[in-house]
Image (spheres, helix red, strand yellow):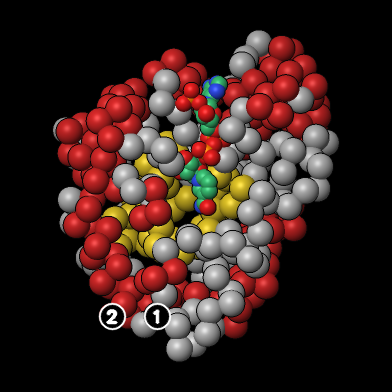
Amino acid sequence: MAQDPTVPTRPTALPALGLGTYKLTGAEGQAAIEHALALGYRHLDTAQAYGNEAEVGAAVRASGLPRHEVHVTTKLTADAFGGVDRVRAAVGTSLERLGLDAVDLVLLHWPHPWRTPEEGTYRDAAAALAALAGESGPLRGWGVSNFLPEHLDALAADGLTAAVNQIQVDPLIQQRAVQEATRRHGAAVVAYTPLGRGGDVFAHPAVRSVAQEAGVSPAQAVLAWHRAGGRVAIPRSGSPAHLAENLAAQGVALTAAQLAALDAADTGAPARQDPLTFGL
Ligand SMILES: NC(=O)c1ccc[n+]([C@@H]2O[C@H](COP(=O)([O-])OP(=O)(O)OC[C@H]3O[C@@H](n4cnc5c(N)ncnc54)[C@H](OP(=O)(O)O)[C@@H]3O)[C@@H](O)[C@H]2O)c1
């Protein structure tokens, strides 16, 4: 039976389908986010680096939904890495831009493993997030993004367990070793760029034939595969039709053979950006 990827991050759970908001900026971006909330999306993924926390927060307020019904994730850039004071200030900057009292999940966007203790490391920042997180504080939960197994090992050595590791996963780039390490360390896998931004993923013969056989779109086939694999997925769309299509994929169940066909599409390639050298 498919595992339910909903992640319990008290007091709200992280819904298995979220809206990625990279590039959803300005009035047009905000309108797309508001439309997503009206359709039924209850999980929004933003980041300081996307420059759209204001639009995300404004969309949440404009939706008229009770705040606790919408899960908002944001991500800190490396400028925030350091002790509790620096991290608290960075979270405060995000809350100000969002116009919200609290954020549900705060992630370290990239590990920046080259940073020195004087500059502030991901280990310091994770410890600070863990100290700040709680039901009554400015952040409910915390996690990481683009962390490789060695970075998760380092956090474990410090006694720190992230709620999620947000990593690139699509049928062609599955990063299985990173997924396994994430789960072994007690974190949930959140798949970013879950559709591979269309293109090669939608054109892949396995994706095309599974979608055709199941009578769904390629995007829906891929999202159903993520869900069956126990991953939270955060596809982005600015198109009302695609937003609705992606939400409806939650009701799509693929057969074991169809899931195996998508599993077999893995190229073994690493994420497009290497966390050992790239960061924001
Ligand atoms: N943590 C990180 O480092 C990191 C890195 C990258 C991304 N992310 C997060 O992950 C989110 C999603 O990733 P992404 O934006 O890179 O790529 P994605 O969600 O895989 O793909 C987005 C593209 O797919 C198209 N699309 C969406 N639904 C579709 C559908 N049903 N049919 C056809 N085309 C469809 C969209 O076009 P339309 O707008 O026309 O629908 C858009 O061009 C981001 O927005 C961001 O929140 C995180």
Q: Nearer the viewer, residue 140 or 200?
A: 200
Quadrant where the N terminus is found in the figure:
top right
Q: Nearer the viewer, residue 195 or 48?
A: 48
- Does residue 192 sit above or below 279 in this rendering? above
Reading the image, the residue beneath label 1 is 82
Q: Position of residue 212 (x, y in %)?
A: 71, 12
* Mark 1, secondary structure of its residue: loop
Question: In this image, 100 relative to 232: left or right?
Answer: left
Q: Position of residue 200 (x, y in %)?
A: 71, 29
Q: Rate crowding at label 1 as few (under 14), some (14 to 19) or many (20 or more) other CA atoms within 10 Å.
A: many
Residue depicted at x 66% and y 11%? 215
Residue 170: quadrant of the picture: top right
Residue depicted at x 59% and y 52%? 167
Reading the image, the residue beneath label 2 is 85
Q: Is the C-beta separation of discs 1 and 2 under 8 Å?
A: yes
Question: In this image, 254 relative to 85: left or right?
Answer: right
Residue 18 visible in the shown view: no
Residue 275 visible in the shown view: yes
What mark, if any, has residue 131 been given in the picture?
Answer: none
- Does residue 124 sit above or below 221 in this rendering? below
Residue depicted at x 81% and y 42%? 267
